Image (cartoon, rainbow, N blue to C red):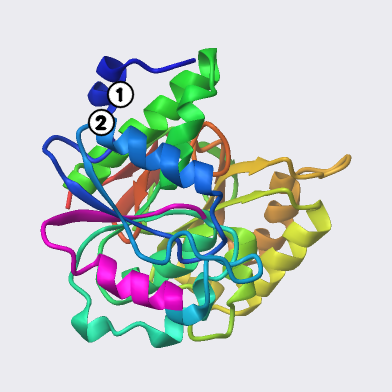
């Protein structure tokens, strides 16, 4: 599917206006053609993309050294009239930045991303700054490669970013699997399971407020690795602080004859933590935006978060 200029301008994932959007690569190296395509599409949507100086850098599999990525990170938030800082991709590397972020001089500009960016989203939440768990910027290019239902899902995922940035309330369908089947409320946290488990016990560990609703997703992992990550994550925090776990997509995960839900249920049951699944977020076409830290309610009607 090739999107027309009219269709692109109507999508507008960052909302109305000629917004300046800062593009950073805080983790894995980004293919040059993906960067160029993303900037072109943003311009066609009516935005002003500002690619940070080191976004094309490469250091091993990373988007530059820690110093290069950190310089871009800080500079992005200080651009004049910047509406949001949008990560180009995930991969690996965000945890290397955590101890070097100068929070005192970081304006409260929203950060957008997911996957390895989960580490930054949690750190921003801990410092009372706005973050949106949503598709990375280079996934704009996938819109032109998608067709049919996939194209519709990817367009809807991109379009869901704007209301999240505005601070609107939102809703996701969610199906109860196990644990307490009662209405629950709490702040939304979480992201990529493997990434969050990898920083357990470090300065970048998942920030877990009381009564948290934990959103989890993953990609390309065997079931035993997902179980290892879940156990690591649960052992690193106080399970009593969790109200529920909500599962998004576990894309291309080899689970054999078992299921992610069954494995999760086994480890959550002793803590009386509710488990929900089939939420439309994660790696894949269905990746609806949700605001990290927002107060939300889980019920038979699904997951609903409040306007900010």
Dot label at residue 8: 1
- Residue 28 pos. (x, y %): 57, 61
Q: Quadrant of residue 293?
A: bottom left
Q: Is residue 15 visible?
A: yes
Q: On the picture, is 90 further left or further right than 264?
A: left
Percent coordinates x, y for residue 229 in the rendering: 70, 66
Q: Is residue 90 magenta?
A: no
**Magenta part of the protein: which range?**
68-89
Where residue 72 sits, quadrant-wise, is bottom left
Which residue extends farthest top? 148
Crowd rating for badge 1 (residues with CA inside 10 Å; few <14, some 14–19, many 20+): many
From the top left corner, tell me how far across and down residue 226 is, in percent. Answer: 73, 58
Q: Position of residue 300 (x, y in %)?
A: 43, 35
Cβ–Cβ under 8 Å for marks 2 and 1: yes
Quadrant of res 195? bottom right
Residue 86 among those drawn in magenta: yes
Relative side of 253 to 36, left or right: right
Q: Which mark is residue 30?
A: none
Identify residue for label 2. 45
User: How many labels, in total?
Assistant: 2
139 to 275, vertically: above or below = above
The earlier-in-sequence mark between 2 and 1 is 1
Viewer-nearest residue: 287 or 303 = 287
Residue drawn at x 47%, y 39% as measured from the top left = 139
Q: Is residue 301 visible?
A: no
Asked if residue 30 is positioned above or below residue 53 in the image, the reply reads above
Spatial distance from mark 2 to mark 1, Cα to Cα? 5 Å
Q: Secondary structure at mark 2?
A: loop
């Amino acid at each position: 599917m090739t999107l027309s200029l009219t269709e692109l301008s109507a999508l507008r994932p960052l909302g109305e206006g000629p917004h300046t959007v800062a593009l950073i690569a805080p983790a894995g190296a980004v293919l040059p053609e993906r960067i160029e395509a993303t900037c072109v599409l943003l311009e066609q949507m009516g935005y002003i993309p500002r690619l940070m100086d080191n976004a094309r850098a490469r250091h091993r599999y990373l988007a530059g050294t820690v110093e290069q990525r950190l310089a871009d990170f800080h500079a992005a938030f200080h651009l004049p009239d910047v509406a949001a800082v949008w990560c180009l991709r995930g991969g690996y590397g965000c945890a290397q930045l955590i101890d070097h972020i100068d929070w005192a001089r970081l304006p409260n500009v929203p950060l957008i991303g997911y996957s390895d960016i989960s580490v930054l989203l949690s750190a921003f939440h801990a410092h009372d700054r706005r973050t949106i768990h949503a598709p990375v910027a280079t996934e704009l290019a996938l819109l032109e490669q998608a067709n049919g239902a996939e194209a519709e899902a990817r367009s809807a995922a991109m379009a869901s970013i704007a209301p999240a940035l505005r601070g609107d309330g939102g809703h996701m369908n969610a199906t109860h699997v196990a644990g307490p089947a009662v209405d629950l409320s709490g702040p939304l946290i979480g992201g990529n399971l493997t990434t969050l488990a990898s920083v357990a016990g470090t300065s970048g560990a998942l920030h877990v407020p009381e009564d948290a609703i934990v959103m989890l997703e993953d990609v390309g992992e065997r079931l035993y690795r997902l179980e290892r990550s879940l156990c690591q994550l649960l052992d690193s925090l106080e399970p009593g602080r969790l109200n529920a776990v909500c599962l998004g997509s576990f894309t291309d995960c080899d689970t054999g004859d078992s299921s992610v839900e069954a494995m999760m249920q086994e480890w959550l049951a002793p803590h009386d933590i509710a488990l929900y699944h089939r939420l439309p977020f994660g790696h894949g076409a269905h990746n609806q935006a949700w605001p990290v830290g927002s107060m939300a309610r889980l019920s038979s009607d699904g997951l609903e978060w409040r306007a900010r």
